[in-house]
Amino acid sequence: MKKIYHVMNQYNYYMSNIIFNIINIVLVIFLYNFGFFGEQTENIYEILLSFATFSFFTPISIACAIIVLITFITYLKNINENIKKDISIELITYNIIFIPIIIALYFAMYYVWTTFIGSGWFCAFISIFASMFLFNYLYVMHFYKIIDRIFVH
């Protein structure tokens, strides 16, 4: 069987995913707060604040965060040399992996949404990941051509 590849700019691929994920998370929080995913049982801002204060603001975690941040900055400086390279994705394997994951995530979200009352926060959480997978799939299949034409590096 002949393998088919899509070749795209690595920088555009990663930046498009980062920008979409930020927009996706903000949109899901907005939709959750207005009751789109069902009854709002938990305040997302309180969940995020309690998670951050419980997990991140200890002296050990702050030291680890500084080390990770320095390592990440060093990694970004090193990756700039390879940023203009193209990446190629083999489509048959990509479709075999991504299509079932997307279907399963949206089915799970629909099932939880229609079955369990008060599961809005869980539906919102599943929606974030389902949208990430769906955008990544659509970008690799179609949108990379448009983005690579607009943003030439």
Image (tube, rainbow, N blue to C red):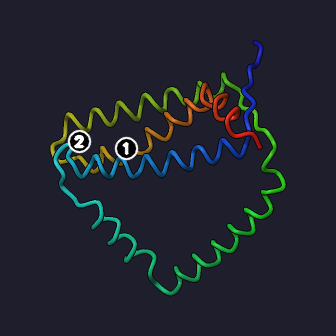
Residue 36 marker = 2
* Residue beneath the point at 64% across and 46% down: 14
Residue 126 marker = 1
Outermost right residue: 81
Question: Gap in Å between the C-alphas at discs 1 and 2?
Answer: 14 Å
Outermost bottom residue: 59
Say few, some or many: other residues with alpha carbon within 10 Å of mark 1 (under 14 / 14 to 19 / 20 or more).
some
Decide if residue 38 is on the left or right side of residue 98: left
The amino acid type, in three-letter code, at marker 2 is: Phe
- Quadrant in the rendering for residue 94: top right
Q: Position of residue 135 (x, y in %)?
A: 51, 35
Say which of 63 and 14 sits in front.
14
Q: Position of residue 132 (x, y in %)?
A: 49, 41
Dot 1: element? helix
Decide if residue 138 is on the left or right side of residue 70: left
* Residue beneath the point at 82% across and 51% down: 82
Residue 27 marker = none
Residue 45 versus residue 9 in the image, above or below: below
